[in-house]
Image (cartoon, coloured by chain):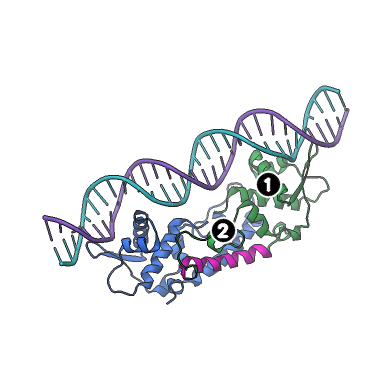
Chain colours: A green, B blue, C purple, D cyan
Amino acid sequence: MLSKKTKYGLKALTYIARSERDSPVQVGEIAKSEKIPQKFLESILLTLRKSGFLGSKKGKHGGYYLIKETSEIKMADVLRVLEGPIAMVPCVSLNFYEKCDDCVDEYQCSVHKLMIQVRDNTLKVLRNNTLKDLAGK
Amino acid sequence: MLSKKTKYGLKALTYIARSERDSPVQVGEIAKSEKIPQKFLESILLTLRKSGFLGSKKGKHGGYYLIKETSEIKMADVLRVLEGPIAMVPCVSLNFYEKCDDCVDEYQCSVHKLMIQVRDNTLKVLRNNTLKDLAGK
DNA sequence: GTAATCCCTAGTAATTCGATAGGGTTAATG
DNA sequence: CATTAACCCTATCGAATTACTAGGGATTAC
């Protein structure tokens, strides 16, 4: 299940991408428009800023803005920051690999075999889709 | 993240599929061999039996056995029973559809758009893979 | 009748999630 | 230079979920 955090984050990014304007977009505006608890959204956007997806401007008339082309923002990267590993088990994760305690032979493990395929296909989708695709611009 | 329940369930099914024998396979044997807490595994196999994947025999020399051909057991079906919906958000679920509270227009929703694709690809894999494929027979 | 096995329900400890609280800091504005 | 509007940051907390555990009941082989 996708966490609310990720869901809200994606919606916010899309909102910012769709708002064609020079000035930054405020958290309050996004929260209201997308029906997201404002304080929660604040922390999510903070994370996205620290991860290099967003820039921010403080003080009055401040807000958040994209610092990359929408076509440069891959969903795989956003998901990794907000949701964590894309793989459903650590033993098939590219970026967060971890051996199973129980598993004797990874190569023989049926779960491994299946989840590798799921990961590959999910990754294909998440790498193909950029914020540009989602925002529809 | 895949739950332990599902992981254990898949491993157990694979174990049973790989054990070529006429007599049923005991929970204790599977638990020991696959390093799964036995009581936990008991409840998982019970679920799988009630869902029509396994048959059981009670009493001494009892245990569990497959009641379908391994090639007839699709991973998508097993996952739905053990893990729940395959979709990452209810609004793109085929079997457990639910509208988002917040979402005004599903068609415009970027999360929806992305998760439909993820679901389609995951489903493709899970429908293609049967227990036969996982067990490697 | 005894031991081995599945059947079933309840409970519980640990973790994660979703959100809130409560301010601190910075910048525009008149 | 005071006020206000915004982001910045940490801590905390209740609810839900997960991963088990406990404790026995029912059934069958021998």
Q: Is residue B103 visible?
A: no
Letter of the chain that mark 2 sits on in the rendering: B
Q: Is residue C17 above or below residue B36?
A: above
Output the chain of dot 1: A
Image location of residue C16, percent across then percent down = 53, 47
| Residue that numbered label 1 is attached to | A47
The foreground one among A100 and B52 is: A100
Q: How many marks?
A: 2
Residue B71 visible in rendering = yes
Residue B11 image offset from top left, x and y in percent: 42, 64
Q: Is residue D21 left or right of residue A70?
A: left
Q: Nearer the viewer, mark 1 or mark 2?
A: 1
Compared across the picture, whether B73 is left or right of A10 comes to left
Could you say which quadrant of the image residue D10 lies in? top right
> The residue tagged with tag 1: helix, strand or loop?
helix
Classify residue B22 as left or right of residue A31. Answer: left
**What residue lies at 78% left-to-right and 55% top-to-bottom?**
A68
- The tag on residue B37 is none
Give, as a single range, the part of the protein colored magenta. Answer: A108-128
- Location of residue B116 in the rendering, given as x and y in whole percent from the top left corner: 60, 61
- Which residue in the protein does label 2 denote? B92
Q: Is the residue A117 above or below the residue A6 in the image? A: below
